[in-house]
Structures are given as structure tokens and as C-alpha cells.
Image: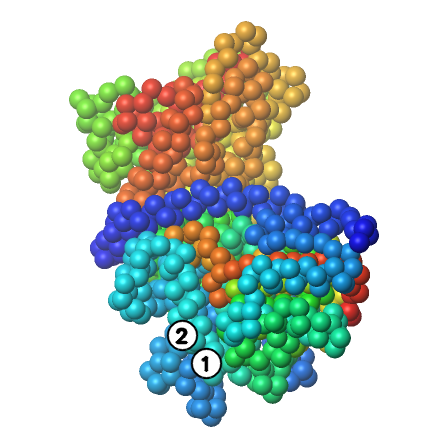
Amino acid sequence: MSSPDFKQRIIDAISNPTLTGALGRFSVAYRTARAKAYEETDFEAVRDQIATIKSASADHFDEVAGRFQQAAEARGTKVFRTSDPQAVKDYILNLSRERGVKSIVKSKSMASEEIHLNQYLIDAGIAVQETDLGEWIIALAGQTPSHMVLPAIHMTKEEVADVFSNKVEEGQMPDIPKLVKFARAKLRPVFLGADMGISGANIAVAETGSIVIVTNEGNARLVTTLPKIHVAIVGLEKLVEKFQDIAPILTALPKSATAQLMTSYVSIISGPAPNTDGSPKELHIILMDNRRNDMAHDPKFKQALQCIRCASCLNVCPVFRLVGGHVFGKIYTGGIGTILTAWFDALKQSDEIQSLCIQCGNCNEVCPSKIDIAGLILELRRRLAVEQGQPLIQKAIFSVVNNRRVFHSMLRAASIGQAPFAREGYIRHLPLFLSDLTKSRSLPAIAAEPFRDRIKKIKQPKCAERAAFYGGCLVDFAYPEMGEALVKVLNKAGIEVTFPEGQTCCGAPARYSGAYEVAAQNAADNIQALLAEDVKYVVSACPTCTVALKQDFADSLDAVGRKNEVDTANKLAAKVIDFTSLVEQLVQAGRLKFKAGTPPVKFTYHDSCHYKRTLHADQSPRRLMQQAGHELVEMEEHDMCCGMGGSYTLKMPEISAPILERKLVNIENTGAPLLLIDCPGCVMQIRGGLDKRGSHVQVQHSVERLAECIE
Amino acid sequence: MNSVLQSSPLIDKFKLRLEAVGGRFEHVSGKEEALALVLDLLRQEGVADTAEDAAVWADGSLLTAENKERLAAAVPGIRFDVTRAQVAKAKVGISQLEWGLANTGTLVQAADAVDTRLVSSLPMLHIALAPTAGVLPDLPAVLEKVHPEKAAYLAFITGPSRTSDIERVLTIGVHGPERLIVILVDELEVAL
Ligand code: SF4
Ligand code: SF4
């Protein structure tokens, strides 16, 4: 649970226009630039290669590290392996003392930040200089990095000029090229006078004992060339087995990190090269574990070791771009930072940070190492919930949510109680735990009669084929008309729709809060209800529910040890399909036709997170609507989360609101009078938001539009 | 001299990619032309016989004893004794590199000799000479050619030194050269 202090930091970050402006603009530019950088590269193939290579190393770190050591030592490198961060610091300090090192230059090394090396050496009386421009700026400013690749992205040139003027030399002007030249001029003598260079490494090759270091500024070349001693601190996860394994990583890293085809400078160092005075370089490589081996032995978290620290998961994250790395992370930031903090620091250190994740899945889509970042954050949430127990208030909410009749009456009571404030079907303010929801958007009125009762009154033709409809709370209670539209369309294709009464909450709210026991029970209840019917399909119009039925049921049951129920979960999963995909199949089979002469309407489409990134169904509605004669106008960031995220709106209204705001602007900018969506949750969020703005854009679920367009 | 330049889609791509990262592309046929071009460039840069205006030229196959003599006579200020102090002050660094990567506009060098690293890191302008035949399609191709057995320090250079650390504004010439001129020379042989 978030402390008031954490909430305050979120609010401070969101209300800092420099931060949100810089991160916001970057996220927009990054998206295009990244796509361009990958134009000639098969991203899927490369990320598969990276995942395979790195996962193979993590399978046997000790052995690979041993081979690295052997190969490197054979070439004259000194290798020190340790699992203890303190031992790393002692090693470097001892070496510095033995060699009389007074001044150290560093190129970027996150591993050194992880163990707070600089302060340790400075306390011991050694001058330590960060030479990466961004790192230098934040070190001078006494701050920590706000982004893994762009550490000073939160600062303006004016702030940088002030820092330089106050800490280095009076009178610096906020002129970027001049500030850069100033840094060059000031750091050059430090490079030339340094006794030791410390670097990180992006890759370590066991076969040859090589390390690979990439920088754009060229500082790593100087750090590894000018001082007579070079120490590289390398996390175990940097290990790969073969020299050729460098290729895919070096192909993806610059593209994902900075949208470059190649970083300006890459150094592959495979042993001591001569110093400037002809003596051989003294090269030390420290292979640091710090819980990486423990991580490798955790079947779920092992994949996080595939990370190549490109930070693209930060750049595409709707939350990160609002709050930045000072709130979202510690040394390592954003989605992956949350995971690494939990391991390198401590699980409970990730408690507040993990709650920032809205589970949109954007990060997974771009990760060049193919890490299920969103899934791992959820797993952290689950482990935290197990460790800390479920908060009472949450327990109370779930017990209501799981009893469908009670839940409906309660929502309905709330809805009617506020009837005087209702306008055009919306409620202005809801009491109870839902009150926070209404700050930035209106809520739907709760139907007097839930869909589970309304379907009984629909006259359906007797058909040979039957489908069970899984409603989910929103269709059942708030938008029964979507359910009616669904029945209408499927009936036309000769499919009769049943609504198994025993169905309950899909378990997503519990699962996304880490309450897996509750989610697993929801799964079991639903499986029983839905498999009891003799139907060909189990269809849903809510992507979150569809994902729950298709994937999460099995996973939740498995996670809580109810392994013998996983088979039936899979049996159910095989029948599950989302409504719009089913319609597309039926249209292709000639079982459904579009009305001729529908007046063409311009529409824009919002991609719901689960619909696009888990179900990959995002093109079906676009194709269908165009076949129906509608014209698609894509909005900017059409696949960016709308800020709903289930109960996220409740827990993080401060973040959800600006995410929604941005979505609404993008919708309105298209000028299209119609917005289609395949998720009732997004419909609720966006319809409510548009209503509150007094917008006239019509928001429909695809099911409603299809019911109008199909013959 | 009217010799025909070795052209290929690979070279075109290399040029395109090099220019896209802010490098300047030159292409000559013979070694003599290459040396003449370098001399021209050095004159344009105002290279002269003071520490600050000097050009330091790291050892390579083009620098035969005879050539060194001619070059030094042509442009006073060219230095072949590459010391750290010398390079730290100099205006221009010149070196020979072995390979190019067409799809990224990158130059690659087995840079064990510290001179070659110094002249390509410290001065504001780096003039890089490379054999046309050394241009390979991509990274995997060059990793096939070079093995750590033969190179303790393998250096890849793609355009000038750059940063976007302040307000994400691309700015060149941070810790390394601000300008990079690549001269592909057909007559140069690929050293292995
Ligand atoms: S799932 Fe979405 S919110 Fe969570 S870390 Fe990834 S991009 Fe950010
Ligand atoms: S988790 Fe993936 S996207 Fe994020 S930094 Fe690591 S490699 Fe990059």
C-alpha cells in the first residue's frame, strides 16, 4: 500500500512540468524513431536470439563465469568473482591503495551504482569522477538518475547551467552546445591525470574472455585507454557464451536504447592492450553476483536476467512518462527497475513502486530481451500479498464483488441514491469506495436489471450451434445493452446464446492486486459454470475477461498449487473467443453479412491493452468496420492505455487521470465523430471522460456498432 | 588520374549510413590520391607547426618512411611520433582502419596499438582511411573476420562523438571528435 509520502512524491512529479514535458515529448519521439531504427531488422527474430542466448547463460552462471575467467586470465586479465557487493568495493579500494591511485575516472556502470561504489571510494579519500555527461550532471547536482539511459532527462539546460556555475565555474550560460564543450574542457584534464579507469560492460563473452562497452560520447574509450589500470564491474547477467553472441545484442541495443543503428563507439576488450607509455595495461574484471544467481534459480524471475538495460520499457510506459525514475524505481527504474529493485535491494523495497504499474503490457511488446515485465511485476505483487497478507478493505471489496447479486444491488443502490445528479445516463458522483473514480470522468448508470435477468426475456431462435456468453461485471451490470447486441448478432449467424448463471467475477481485480487465492477460486467457480453447458464457444466482449478465461485461470490455479484443476482450465480456454474475432470468422464463413448502403462514418479506434497485446485481436475490428463501409482515422498513440487498468483508477487516481486526459485529446484531434473500442472498461473510462469534457464524440463498443451494421 | 572507383551497393549503403550519422564520406582509387586528399584537408583545416595546430598521424601501411618525409615536407605540423601529450593538444588525428560495416556506416579496427586509439579519440577532427575492400555487410560478418586472438582491443567507430544528455538535444563532440572524415581507398589492402 502506498504511504502518504509516496503519494506526495507522485503528485510532485506529475505537477513538475519540466519532468512530464521532457518525458512526454521523448516518449512520442522515441516511438517513431525506434520504429525507423528497426526498419531493416527482424525484431522478433533478434529478440528471440537474445532471449535464447541470455537464458542459456543464466541456466549455468557458475560454469559460464568459470569459462570467462579462464579465457580472460589466459590473456592476462585479472578476474575477481564475488557474490558480495562489499567485496567488490573492498577489492577496488585495496587495489587503489596498493597502486597509489588518487584519481579515478568512470564511464557509466549501473552495477557500480547498485553497490554505491562512488561514495565508498570518495569516503576513502579517492577522487572519483563520473564522465558520462548526464551522470556527471546529476552527480554534481547531488541527485540520482531519473532514467537508465538518459540520467538527467528531468533537468532543463537552465538547471544544468546553474549546476555548472555553482559547482564548477561561475557564469555558465544555458546554451547546450556550450555546456557540452564546457564539460569536454573540464573533464579532459581529469581523464589525462587519472590513475584508474572504472567502467561497466554491456556484454561479457565467456568463450574469449572479452567485454563489450558501448558509449556515444566516447568517454569509455578514454576511460579504458588513458589510465594505466582499468577495472570493469560486470554483473553476471552480462555473460554470453560465444563471441558471435555479441551480434544480436549489439544489433538491438542501440536501436532500442537510443533509436540509433549503432552506438558511436563500441570497444571489445579481450585482454590488456599496451598503455601510452608502452607498458601493458593492468586489466581487472569483477564479475559480480549480488543475487543474480538466486534470481537465476527462480523459475519465474530467471528471465529478468535477459535484460540488456536498453530502457525501452521505460520509454513506452504510460506511467513512467508521468512520474519519471525518481518515483518509479530506485537505481534501476521503470518496469524492469521495479523487478531489479525487488531482487538486488529487497522485495519490500519494491512494494510502492510495483503499485505504479497499470499492467498495460507496452513494455513487453518492445523489450528486445523478450521479458514478460508486466507479468513479473504481477508476480511481485502476488508475493508481496502473500508476505504481507491482504488488507482488510480489499478483503471486504472482494467478498462483495464475488457475490454477483449483492454486488449489483450495491452498485445499483449507489447509482439510484445519486439519481438527481444523473444526466444522460451518467452519474456525477458515486459514494463508497468508488468515489475517487469520478474526479476526472463520469460513471455509467447501473442498470436496474442486470443482463443475467434481461437475457431471459430475449426471444432467441432455436439453433444448432450454441455459445455461452461470459458477461463480466461491466456488461452484466452497467452495459446490458452490449450483451443484447451480442445476442442479436450471434443469433443472425445461427448461434444461440446462453448465460450460465453460475458465472462470477473473472478474478482479474483480485489477481491484479496480488490476491491469487481469491482469483483461483473465481477461476474454479467460472470453470465449473461454463463447462457445465454444452456449447461450441465461450464468448466474451471484455478483453480482460477473455484473457482471464483463456490464460489466467490456469495460471492462478497453478500459482496457488491447485494443479489438478489446470487441465479443466485449459479445456475451457480452448473454447474461449472474443466477440469481434468470432464475428470476423463468421463473416469470412459467409454466415454474417453487412447491410448494403450504410452511410459511411469516420471512426477512430482505441486499442485496449489486453485486446491488442495479449489477444492480438486489434486488426479484426478495424477490418470489419472498414468492410462495413466505415472510414478509419487512426489517432496518435492509438494503442496507449486509457488509464483504466481495472482498480488502478481507484488506487492511483493521480496517475490515471492525466493518462486519460492525453487519450481524450488524441481522440478529439482525429475529428472523427465515432470512437470504437472492444473493451467495456475502456468504454466506461473514455465515455465518462469525454462526457465530462462535454465532447460530442460517440463512444461505442464494437458489438454495438456491429449490431447496427450487420444485415 | 582517371581511374574508375570500385562501386557497389555495399559502398553506397556505407556512404548513406555514415552520412546519416554526421560523418563525411570520401572515396579515392589510389594511395597517392588518398595522401593528396589528406594533405588538402589538412591545409583547409589550417594545420601548422604548433602543438595546438598539429595533425598526429598514427602508424599504418600508408606511412612508409619515404611517404612520411614527403608528407611532413608538404604540410608542416604533421607529426608521426604519437605521444599522449602531443595528441592531447593536436587539432587533427589521422589513422588507418581495417573494416567498414555497410549497414551502420561503422569503421572497425584492431586497435591494440594505443596510438590509433589516441588519434581517433582526443582531437576534434578524425580523418580515417580504410580499404574499400574492407567494407563488409554487417556486424556478424566482421565478427567472423576478427578474433580476440588477434585483437585485444577492437574499436568500432560510427560517426562523431555525440550526446543527448541535456534536454535530449543531439550535440556532437563531447569526449571524442566533433567531426569524422572517412576516406575509402580502393588500392589499400585489407590487413589481417
Ligand atoms: S505494464 Fe505498462 S504500466 Fe506496467 S511497467 Fe509495463 S508499460 Fe509500465
Ligand atoms: S527489460 Fe527489456 S526493455 Fe527493459 S531495459 Fe531490459 S531489455 Fe530493455
- Residue A547 lies, in percent from the top left, at 50, 40
Spot the residue most to the right.
B3
Residue B36 location, quadrant: bottom right
Q: Element type at marker 2?
A: strand
Ligand 2 lies under 8 Å from the Cβ of mark 2: no
Q: Residue at x 26, y 47 (%)?
A: A15
Outermost residue on the top side: it is A597
Name the residue furthest bottom.
Answer: A98
Residue A566 lies, in percent from the top left, at 56, 48
- Residue A129: which numbered mark, if any? 2
Q: Is residue A27 above or below residue A546?
A: below
Which numbered disc flags the more N-terminal residue, 1 or 2? 2
Residue at 20% across / 35% down in the picture?
A431
Q: Position of residue A206 (x, y in %)?
A: 65, 73
Q: Which residue is mark 1?
A: A194
Residue type beneath disc 2: Gln
At a point 27% along the width and 66% down the height, the residue shown is A170
Q: In the rendered image of this protein, does residue A211 appear above or below residue A88?
A: above
Checking the image for residue A6, the label placed there is none
Residues at marks 1 and 2 touching, judged by CB atoms closer than 8 Å:
yes
Marked residue chain, label 2: A
Residue A7 in picture, x, y percent from top left: 25, 52
Instruction: Tell me the quadrant of the picture where the C terminus of chain A can be found.
Output: top right
